[in-house]
Image (cartoon, grey):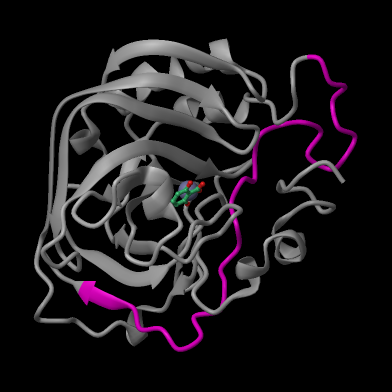
Amino acid sequence: MVGWGYAKANGPSTWPAMFPVAGGSKQSPIDIKRRGCPEDPRLNKIRAAYADIMISELSNSGASWKAQIGSGRSSLRGGPLGDDEYVLEQFHPHWGKTNERGSEHTVDGTCYPAELHLVHWNKSKFSSFAQAAASEGGLAVLGMFLTIGQEHPEMSKICNLLPFISHKGQAITVTNPVRPETFLPKNGSYYTYSGSLTTPPCYESVTWIVFEQPIQVSEAQLDAFRRLKSYHPCEDCPQDELQGALVENYRPPCPLCDRVVRKYSD
Ligand code: GRE
Ligand code: ZN
């Protein structure tokens, strides 16, 4: 077997064999059960500030597209993050083949067509993203559900570049301004819990902040995601059920175990 992925042969149920922590008790995503989320009066609004953010590279990992942040200033504070400051490292989405599914987190069993992850690391406690990603309290990820509706102008800037990274391993160096704040929903209500990266190595280092209100993208924008390929340009198209399409790149919900999901209402 070549590596992890989302097909039957190398999908999420096979990950723990290669990455034991993927079978652990603080894994992500989860199904958020609204009835089981106490409002915590100690939680407050998430404060995200981004200025002059430039994407340095847009790449196709075979498992998603990823926008790597190259320059600018970012600060994520507040909410469940205590006194620490986190900075934006990269953002990427997960999506389905059709609109019936695609998000990683679900709410009372309901899936959204896609989910966007803004990945931040704890600059107060760590000196690099790699170090933070492998450490408890190292990462904070803002998760946004995507629904089909209005075209998202900021997302269009990304979608227009995806044809240049159609296949796994392809990357373009860009100096593209991006305004990550445009990906945050107007309403600041969120769910928060301690979890993990949703892809191998599945480190249990993530404070998840999943917004309740979805943001809109157009069907054409999601279709641009769905045209990406999960295999290298020189490889033959895989003959599995996904046929080389980079779709269904979401991990199904993991057991909550003894964790509590807290809610902040804006
Ligand atoms: C992912 O690969 O999907 C991922 C990261 C980092 C944090 C969260 C996450 O790479 O889902
Ligand atoms: Zn992700």
Image quadrant assignment for residue 32: bottom left
Residue occupying image coordinates x 85% and y 52%? 9
Q: Quadrant of the C terminus?
A: bottom left
Side of 57 relative to 208 (left or right): right
**Magenta stretch: residue 102 in it?**
no
Q: Residue furthest front?
A: 127
User: What range is drawn magenta here?
Assistant: 234-263
Residue 113: x %, y % from top left: 50, 47
Q: Is residue 24 above or below residue 122?
A: below
Q: How many marks?
A: 0
Q: Is residue 64 above or below residue 163?
A: below
Residue occupying image coordinates x 26% and y 38%? 183
Residue occupying image coordinates x 39% and y 28%? 68
Residue 255: x %, y % from top left: 56, 79
Q: Is residue 250 above or below residue 160?
A: below
Residue occupying image coordinates x 29% and y 46%? 127
Side of 211 relative to 101 (left or right): left
Image quadrant assignment for residue 92: top left
**Magenta stretch: residue 237 in it?**
yes
Dominant secondary structure, magenta: loop
Q: Is residue 78 above or below residue 1?
A: below
Residue 219: x %, y % from top left: 47, 31
Residue 150: x %, y % from top left: 32, 32
